[in-house]
Amino acid sequence: MMIKAVVFDLDGTLLNTLEALSYCMSLTMEHFGLKKIDKEHTRYFVGEGARKFVDRSLIYNGDKELKLANEAYKVYDEIFARDCLKDVKPYDGIMELLSDLKNLDIKTVVLSNKSQSGVEKNIHTIIGEGVFDFIYGERPGIPKKPDPTALNLIIKELGFSKDEILYVGDTATDMKTALGAGVTSIGVLWGFRDENELRENKADYIVKSPCEILEIIKEYKALS
């Protein structure tokens, strides 16, 4: 089958948001007199939505019972709304890949555990409007990744079969999401996690640069 759509994770896949995430959470923790969250810890605290990020940061700071959680969520939301674009940029080769996919008439979608407004702000400001066919962030009543519900909804909306879709991400959460939905997964090595995590979570492909994704798509075309 030919590939007709590519679904991308956002953080660590399309955009390098590590500085912004670390900065916003550090300001949140400092609001409560707690330690900053450096970029190395941020790599492993993110990936399952803002609330999990806040929870893990509080636990790291000793609040194991999450007594500050509700207030911290509100503080983080305010800071993130203001500073979520700090030093954010596309990874090398991403803009070229998106252009190539458009030229091949391949649909592109973003699926993130970030808030819908946060995803749209990042994509529209850094990458541009009208680049993606659909943008899916956190939505009421739809469980976050790695639950495959959102990805299955995207597949239904696209109207393609599952073997015509690639899912691209950088974490175990992403690989589990693809596996749960029954689509082919591509794990990227330029993001927040390492190769071992991607292999342990059954990535179908692992790539070192965005141009390799295009080569995979061309292989599918040659075999069709």
Image: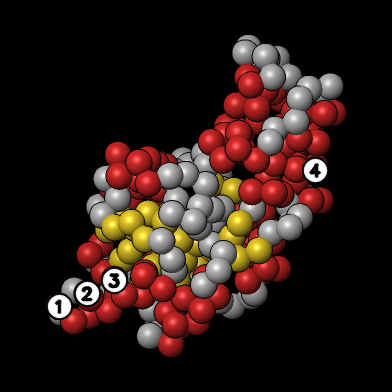
What is the x, y in percent for residue 119?
62, 57
Task: Tell which circle, 1 or 4, labels the residue nearer the N-terminal end.
Answer: 4
What is the x, y in percent for residue 162?
25, 62
List the residue tagged with mark 3.
Answer: 216
- Outermost residue, left side: 223
Could you tell me how far apart the alpha carbons at marks 1 and 4 are, in whole angstroms? 49 Å
List the residue tagged with mark 1.
Answer: 223
User: The residue under label 1 is which amino acid type?
Assistant: Leu
Task: Tell which circle, 3 or 4, labels the residue nearer the N-terminal end.
Answer: 4
As drawn, 137 above or below 67? below
Q: Residues within 10 Å of mark 2 (few under 14, many from 20)?
A: some
User: The residue under label 4 is which amino acid type?
Assistant: Ile
List the residue tagged with mark 2.
Answer: 220
Could you tell me how far apart the alpha carbons at marks 4 and 2 are, in whole angstroms? 43 Å
Could you tell me how far apart the alpha carbons at marks 3 and 2 are, in whole angstroms? 6 Å
List the residue tagged with mark 4.
Answer: 79
Look at the numbered discs 3 and 2 and tell me whether their residues touch, using CB distance below 8 Å: yes
Q: Residues within 10 Å of mark 4 (few under 14, many from 20)?
A: some
Tell me which corner region of the image, top left, top right, bottom left or bottom right, holds residue 63: top right
Residue drawn at the location 84% of the way across and 28% of the way down: 31
**In screen coordinates, is 97 left or right of 2?**
right
Identify the element where label 2 is drawn: helix
